[in-house]
């Protein structure tokens, strides 16, 4: 970090998909963004940073670092702990969807789910969650 201008060094902010470069970009934005005026602005700031450091499908690492951990981003998430809202930003859709946990029964033990790959998801999807039963495979017989 100390090699980059914002943190006392001489280098400009990197723009490639190398994980270290993405970390520097995220840290730079977090350090320079103004204090958010409200929760909406805070979520917007974090969503913008997450999108900025996401790796699109098909991106090639041009950093020359030889990194082997450049994987495409499937989705980004932002959590508003104060208002109990979980935002999801899939890469296969320009839309953002969210679950408002304040609208769910906190006393229920039911597992709820939806298909995060559904490109039609947008906005508050809290009422679209459906009961989910995980596939249970029987244990193999003991010898």
Image (tube, rainbow, N blue to C red):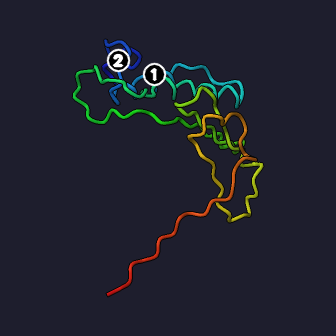
Which part of the image, by quadrant, shows the N terminus?
Answer: top left
| Residue under label 2 | 4
Measured from the top left, where is residue 22 in percent x and y? 39, 26
Are the residues at dot 1 and dot 2 in contact (C-beta closer than 8 Å)?
yes
Q: Quadrant of the C terminus?
A: bottom left
Q: Secondary structure at mark 1?
A: helix
Residue 134 location, x and y as percent?
A: 56, 63
Which residue, as the protein is rendered here, is positioned at the far bottom?
143
Q: Residue at x 30, y 36 (%)?
A: 69
Residue 88 as seen in the image, left or right of residue 73 = right
Q: Which residue is mark 1?
A: 28
Q: To which quarter of the image does residue 38 belong?
A: top right
Q: Residues within 10 Å of mark 1 (few under 14, many from 20)?
A: some
Decide if residue 114 is on the left or right side of residue 49.
right
Q: Helix, strand or loop at disc 2?
A: loop
Residue 57 shows which numbered tag?
A: none
Location of residue 139 by image quarter: bottom left
Identify the mark nearer the N-term, 1 or 2.
Answer: 2
Q: Is residue 121 above or below residue 56?
A: below
Q: Nearer the viewer, residue 131 or 6?
A: 131
Find the distance from the CA under tag 1 to the CA under tag 2: 9 Å
How many neighbours does mark 2 have within 10 angstroms: few (below 14), some (14-19), or many (20 or more)? some
Q: Is residue 21 above or below residue 100?
A: above
Residue at image x 53%, y 65%?
135
Residue at image x 32%, y 13%? 11
Relative to 75, is 33 above or below?
Answer: above
Q: Position of residue 49 (x, y in %)?
A: 52, 25
């Amino acid at each position: 970090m100390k090699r980059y201008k914002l943190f006392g060094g001489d280098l400009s902010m990197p723009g490639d998909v190398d994980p270290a470069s993405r970390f520097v970009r995220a840290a730079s934005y977090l350090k320079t963004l103004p204090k958010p005026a409200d929760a909406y602005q805070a979520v917007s700031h974090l969503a913008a940073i997450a999108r900025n450091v996401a790796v699109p499908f098909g991106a090639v690492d041009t950093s020359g670092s030889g990194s082997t951990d450049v994987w495409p981003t499937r989705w980004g998430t932002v959590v508003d702990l104060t208002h109990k809202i979980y935002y999801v930003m899939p890469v296969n859709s320009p839309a953002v969807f969210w679950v408002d946990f304040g609208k769910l029964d906190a006393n229920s033990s039911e597992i709820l789910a939806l298909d995060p790959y559904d490109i039609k998801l947008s906005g508050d999807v809290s009422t679209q969650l459906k009961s989910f039963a995980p596939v249970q495979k029987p244990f193999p017989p003991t010898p």
